[in-house]
Image (spheres, rainbow, N blue to C red):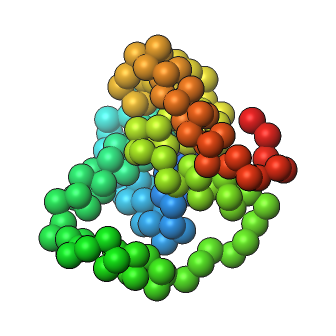
C-alpha cells in the first residue's frame, strides 16, 4: 500500500485521535502532520503481519508525548504569573460551538495520562489491551486511568444534563 492509500484509509480516524489528544484544533493539525511524517520516516520498521492502525496510533501518542515534553522545557511559556497565562489563553479565539464541546473541553483539561487513555479507548474505540499496549502500561493500569478519568469528567460535567456516561 502507498502512503496515500494509508492516509485515505486511516486519516480520518487518526485526526479524531489527534483532536482527542489536543485541546486546540491547530495543535491537532500539527500532531496529525507530524505523525504522518514519522510514519513516512519509519515505514521500513512497520511489520505488515500486524495491524497498521495500532502502530499508527502508537506513533501518534508517542509524538504527542514528545511534544508535551518539549513544551514543558520551553522557555517561551514561562509565565510570571497565572494571570499572564490566562491572558494569553483568553486571546486565543474560541472554537466553534458543537453539541459535545463541553465534553471535549473537559477531556482536554484531564491530565495527559488520563486524556490519552480516554482518547484511545473511547474516541478511537480500541479495546483495553490494545490501548494499554500503545501506552506501554498494564491493562489494570489502563482500567484504573479510565475509571479516574470517568470520575473527573463526571465532576466536571455535573451541570451538563444532556451528556451521559
Q: Quadrant of the C terminus?
A: top right
Q: Residue at x 48, y 80 (%)?
A: 90
Residue 128: x %, y % from top left: 56, 21
Q: Quadrant of residue 164?
A: top right
Residue 75: x %, y % from top left: 15, 70
Q: Nearer the viewer, residue 7 or 16?
A: 16
Q: Residue at x 40, y 16 (%)?
A: 138
Q: Is 50 placed left or right of 98 in the picture?
A: left
Q: Residue at x 32, y 71 (%)?
A: 82
Q: Nearer the viewer, residue 31 or 39?
A: 31
Residue 77: x %, y % from top left: 24, 71
Q: Nearer the viewer, residue 43 or 160?
A: 160
Image position of 142 with respect to 31: above or below = above
Q: Is 165 placed left or right of 36 in the picture?
A: right
Q: Quadrant of residue 133?
A: top left
Q: Quadrant of residue 76?
A: bottom left
Question: Can the viewer see residue 15?
Answer: no
Question: Can the viewer see residue 67?
Answer: yes
Amino acid at each position: 500500500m502507498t502512503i496515500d492509500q494509508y492516509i485515505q484509509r486511516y486519516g480520518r480516524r487518526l485526526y479524531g485521535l489527534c483532536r482527542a489528544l489536543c485541546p486546540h484544533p491547530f495543535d491537532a493539525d500539527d500532531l496529525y502532520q507530524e505523525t504522518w511524517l514519522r510514519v513516512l520516516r519509519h515505514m521500513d520498521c512497520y511489520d505488515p503481519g500486524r495491524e497498521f492502525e495500532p502502530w499508527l496510533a502508537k506513533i501518534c501518542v508517542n509524538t504527542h508525548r514528545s511534544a508535551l515534553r518539549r513544551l514543558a522545557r520551553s522557555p517561551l511559556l514561562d509565565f510570571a504569573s497565572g494571570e499572564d497565562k490566562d491572558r494569553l489563553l483568553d486571546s486565543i479565539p474560541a472554537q466553534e460551538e458543537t453539541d459535545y464541546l463541553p465534553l471535549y473541553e473537559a477531556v482536554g483539561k484531564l491530565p495527559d495520562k488520563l486524556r490519552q487513555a480516554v482518547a484511545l479507548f473511547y474516541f478511537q474505540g480500541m479495546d483495553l489491551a490494545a490501548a494499554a499496549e500503545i501506552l506501554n502500561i498494564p491493562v489494570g493500569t489502563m482500567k484504573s486511568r479510565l475509571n479516574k478519568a470517568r470520575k473527573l469528567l463526571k465532576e466536571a460535567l455535573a451541570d451538563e444534563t444532556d451528556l451521559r456516561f
